[in-house]
Every structure is written in C-alpha cells, then in structure tokens.
Amino acid sequence: MKKSLYLLALVLFIGMKVQAQDGTAKTENDPNAPVITFEKDLHDFGTIKQGDNGTCEFKFKNTGKTPLIISNAKGSCGCTVPDWPKDPIKPGETSVVKATYDTKRIGAFTKTVTVSSNAKDPNMVLTIKGVVEGENPNANMPFKKSGDGTPLEK
C-alpha cells in the first residue's frame, strides 16, 4: 500500500514538473508571443542628495503580436520599490515600469528590479545605480582615528 502511494506521488510530481516546463517552452517558442522591449535597462542617478526623489521610469513597448501581461515586478531589496502596469499592454503600445529607491540611505548603491511577464523572454532585469550623499559630502568619507577615537588631521 505504501509503495503504491509513493509511486502515485512520484508520477504526479513528474507530471506537474513536465507541465510547468512545457508552459515556459511554449511562450519562448511561440512566434506570436508578446515581446517586451525596453528603451534602456539601466538608470544611473549619478550623485543625488539624501532625501531627493529616487524614482525613475523604464519605458517599454510591446513589440510582439499578442497582449503583454506583467504579472510581477520585484526589487532586489526592501529599499527598491517597483510599480508596473496591471492591465494588458496591446501590441504596439508603450508603458513604463517605475523604480523608487529610498534615498534616506547614504552611499553608493546598485539595485535591480526583475520584471516577470508572459513575454517571449519572461524575466527581464532592470538596474538602478547611483550615490546618495548626505548634507555634508565630506561626512560620507571615512577618516582615520587615533587610538583615543579622535580624528587625525590630513
């Protein structure tokens, strides 16, 4: 009895695995699948002040033959929040994915947003980078301290 249950579970697991792989392959090989084409996949903020607007837009177009549906967009950490269109994007239409970085954090950053969709390439990675400096730019620079903790002169 136990062997029958294990065998049934194994057959079901393999069947689900084959079905999941089959669905992805159909999108990748479908000549009518939507195609998400971004104008750029990297946004460099350069140097920005602490507390400034950390939002950028990644404009894209559906260059495929069927509607594009973005199912999710996920930031690489909690300091990067994406916003994406929830309605289908028809062939030939454009839209944007927004990425907002929390500029309260001082220092250099490089973060990503992974966009998941029904496109021929189902996962696209967008990158944002820059440097956030505090009110006093020199305060961001590390400095040496003496043995008693007081800063050393240059």
Image (cartoon, rainbow, N blue to C red):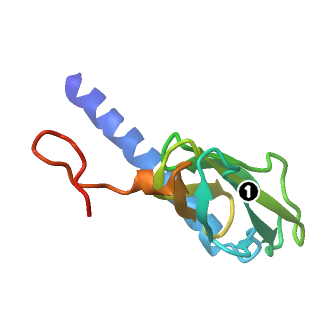
Of 89 and 140, nearer the camera is 140
Residue 32 placement (x, y as % from top left) = 77, 73
Task: Please say whether residue 63 is visible from this viewpoint.
Answer: yes
Residue sitting at the far left? 147
Residue 147 placement (x, y as % from top left) = 10, 44
Residue for badge 1: 97
Above or below — where is 110 with respect to 37? above
At x 22%, y 54%, the residue is 152
Residue sitting at the far front? 153
Task: Please say whether residue 18 is visible from this viewpoint.
Answer: no
Residue 154 placement (x, y as % from top left) = 26, 64
Above or below — where is 69 with respect to 64? above
Residue 51 placement (x, y as % from top left) = 64, 44
Q: Which amino acid type is marked by label 1?
A: Val
Locate the N terminus by quadrant: top left
Binning the other alpha carbons within 10 Å of mark 1 as few (below 14), some (14 to 19) or many (20 upward) gives: some
**In terms of image quadrants, where is residue 69?**
bottom right
Left or right placement of residue 112 versus residue 145 in this view:
right
Above or below — where is 113 with respect to 51? below
Of 22 and 89, nearer the camera is 89
**In terms of image quadrants, where is residue 44?**
bottom right
At x 73%, y 76%, the residue is 39
At x 54%, y 55%, the residue is 132
